[in-house]
Structure formats: structure tokens, C-alpha cells
Amino acid sequence: MSTQNVNVSKPKYTFLDKIKAIGPAVVITGSFIGPGTVTTATRTGADFGYALIWTVLFAIVATIILQEMAARLGVVTRKGLSEAISSAFENHTARYLIRGLVGTAIPLGCIAYMGGDLTGSAAGLSTLTGVSTQILGPLVGIAILVLINFGPFELIEKVLMVLVATMAVVFLISMFAVGPEWSEVAAGLVPSIPEGGMFLVLGLIGTTIVPYNFFVHAINARKAFSSTDQLELSKLDIIVAITIGGLITAAVMITAGTVIRGASVESIATMAQALEPVLGDYAKIFLSVGLIAAGLSSAIVTPLGASYVLAGLFGWKYDKSDKRFFYTNLSILIFGIFISATGLNPVFVIISAQVLNGIILPIAVILLVMITSQSRFMRQFVNGKVSLCLGILISLVTLFLGLKSFISTVSALAGS
């Protein structure tokens, strides 16, 4: 995360300055803590107890490193990642191939995620109200449409901060309430992969390191931090917000590993039932609120992810004043609403998105590391040696992840 030393005096920030700076990275935390992350962490805890806690630690450290690069890119260059990608290749064929891949894979992935986010939010609301998810899903989608297209970004950021705080309270209280064996939790920080655990290792990493979050964060950091003097504040924002996200994921896994280890998990409702002896009748309400917050926080960011990517690739404005940006948000939400309203099993869309995102994740990581290591983009704020080495390591891991995802999804399609 370090950059090359620059011989200039650094501004001194007060504690209040640092607190006020926390916000842009909370958007990223809200994005990756969605129903998919909650469900994956629940299944991991149920299947393997605390053995894969180390995976959460790795994924969070990797996310901090990569999101710091993305934010630094935005602050230093005053551009988005997709803009930088467009200008990174002098060869026209390579440029169009990369732009086509990024511009196709990420919006398609956002459509699949949007359906899952709305369905997850609706499932939590349905538990509390008894109303069908096919009714609640579209209503949630309409509410999000109004928020992201008609509300100021500052309001969106504040809503996400409330949702992330809600998830932290719900899942951390649940974890401490069940009384895990902390020595076993600590043992889970030692890397090991139990037999049959590779799929969930890849799942945890894949649901935490999300390609479109690089694009979102570069733009949001550019808006929030006006000069390179504020890179320190940006880094603090990232470390605090992403770490909270890691604690939420770990709390879900530890809770599941304590109360439903060995159980078959279809949804987080399984864990709610197991928590009833500890939390009583409030268990279902408590976890439903957490699932609602997870779905909403992710669903708010998902359409923005697609819009930011396409805006940078095709020269649009990065806000709703550009009708193309607005209609991209609208399109992603409409597809998500359709999936949640019809009860359609989006297997084909999700499998296709997994194939494309399995490819795009390592490409996005490699491009991010490559661009932030070049002085023609970053001037003196290029990646330092430690950042570069860590970036290369993460690139290799995500490349392995992408290959495994590609092979498994192609096998699934061939077998269907």
C-alpha cells in the first residue's frame, strides 16, 4: 500500500478529520457484504467450523491493498479505472478487446448480483412481514431506484454507513452470544484447506474481492479527496471500512461454526433456528434485519458499478445528469426486479456471469496493479516495492481463482 517516498511535508490531520474522512470505502464494504457473502460464510462455518477463518483474513488484506490502489489512482489521476484502462494500451486491437470484455462481463455480473441482492433483501423482509418475496423484491428495487437516481451521493453514503453499522451490530452480537471456542478460532487463522473446502475458499475470496468495486472506488475517492495530500485519509478510510467488513464476514462464519456445524444449510434461516436457544424469539428477527441490511447495501452499489464502468469506457459523465448513466442504473435494476418478481431461477445468467467474472477478476486486478505501477499515470505515487509484490501475489491468486471458476462453470454447463 505504500508509495515511493516524496520529499514534501505531510499535512497533520486531527482525530476529527480522520473520522470525517471515513465514508467512500464504506460504500465498498456495503457492496461486498451482500446476501451471497452472508450465505457463503454461513455455509463455510456449518461445513468446516472455524478452519477457513484465514481465508477471510487473506481476502480482507487483499481487498485493502487493491482498493487502496484504486482510490490512489482516482485521487492522483482524477480519472476512473476504466478511463485509465482505455488509455493504457496503444494497440487498438488489445484496447478494444479489453474494453469489450470489461464492458460486457461486469454489467452482466451486476445483473445477476442485482437479482440475488433484491431476493435476499426480500427474503429478510418476508420473514418479518409474511409478504411474498415476489412482491417485496420489486418494491425494494423501486426504493433503491429512487435513492440512487434522485438522492444525492452523500445520502447514499450515509444510508450505506447505517446499513453496514446494522450488520456489524447484528452479526457481532450473534457471535459473542453463542460463545465460540476462541482457541479454535485462533487455530483457524493458520492456512489449511480441509478436504472439499476449496470451493468455499474460492467463494469467500470471490465474494470479497469484487471487480466492479475497483471502478466504483476510484471515482468515489476522486470525489471525496481533492488532492494527493489527502491520500493518508483515503488509506485510513479503506483500512477501517474494509476491516469492519471482514469482521462481519468472520462473525457470520464463527456463529455458524458454533451453532450449526455439520448441519445442511439452505439459507441463513437455518442459523436463525439454531440461535433461538440463545436469542429466543428475537433470533429470526435479529438475523432477518442483518440479511435485509446485507441485501440493501449491496443492491445500492451494484447498479452504480455497471454505470461507472461504462461511463469511463465510453466517456459519459459519472452522474445521473447523463441520461446514459441513468438508463444503465435503470436497466440493471429492471433486470434485478424481473428476476425477483417472477421467481425465475437465474441459473443460466448466474453461470454465464460466473464464467465472465471468473475471467474479469484477474484481468481487473492485473490491470489495476499494472496501471498504478506506471509513473506516466501515477507520477511519483506509483506502487512501492511492497505494494507491487503483494499486488503480483494477489494477481496470481485471482488468476488461479479465475481458472478454477472457469473450469467449474464450463463443466457445469457441459453436464446440464
Image (tube, rainbow, N blue to C red):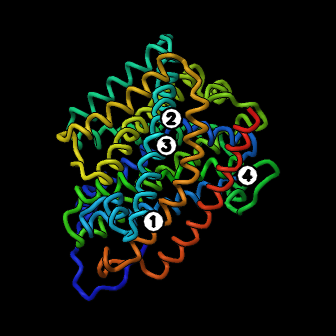
Among all residues in the image, which is located at the extreme bottom? 7
| Horizontal arrangement in the rendering, residue 95 relative to residue 248 (left or right) | left
What residue type is disc 3 on?
A: Ile
Residue marked by disc 2: 112
Query: Sequence-wise, which precedes: disc 3 or disc 1?
Result: 3
Up/down of 340 relative to 357, above or below: above
Among all residues in the image, which is located at the extreme left? 321
What residue type is disc 1 on?
A: Leu
Residue 398: which quarter of the image?
A: bottom right
Front: mark 4 or 2 = 2
**Between 357 and 275, the one nearer to me in the picture:** 357
Whole-percent x, y for residue 160 in the image: 35, 40
**Between 142 and 184, the one nearer to me in the picture:** 142
Q: Measure the alpha-carbon separation of dots 4 and 1.
A: 26 Å
Element class at badge 1: helix
Determine contact: label 3, label 1, CB under 8 Å: no
Crowd around label 3: few <14 · some 14–19 · many ≥20 (10 Å) = many
Q: Which label belongs to residue 198?
A: 4
Question: Is residue 77 visible to us here?
Answer: yes
Whole-percent x, y for residue 252 in the image: 59, 41
Whole-percent x, y for residue 46 in the image: 72, 38
Query: Sequence-wise, which precedes: disc 4 or disc 1?
Result: 4
Residue marked by disc 3: 33
Instruction: Name which residue lies at 49% across and 43% down.
Output: 33
What residue type is disc 4 on?
A: Met
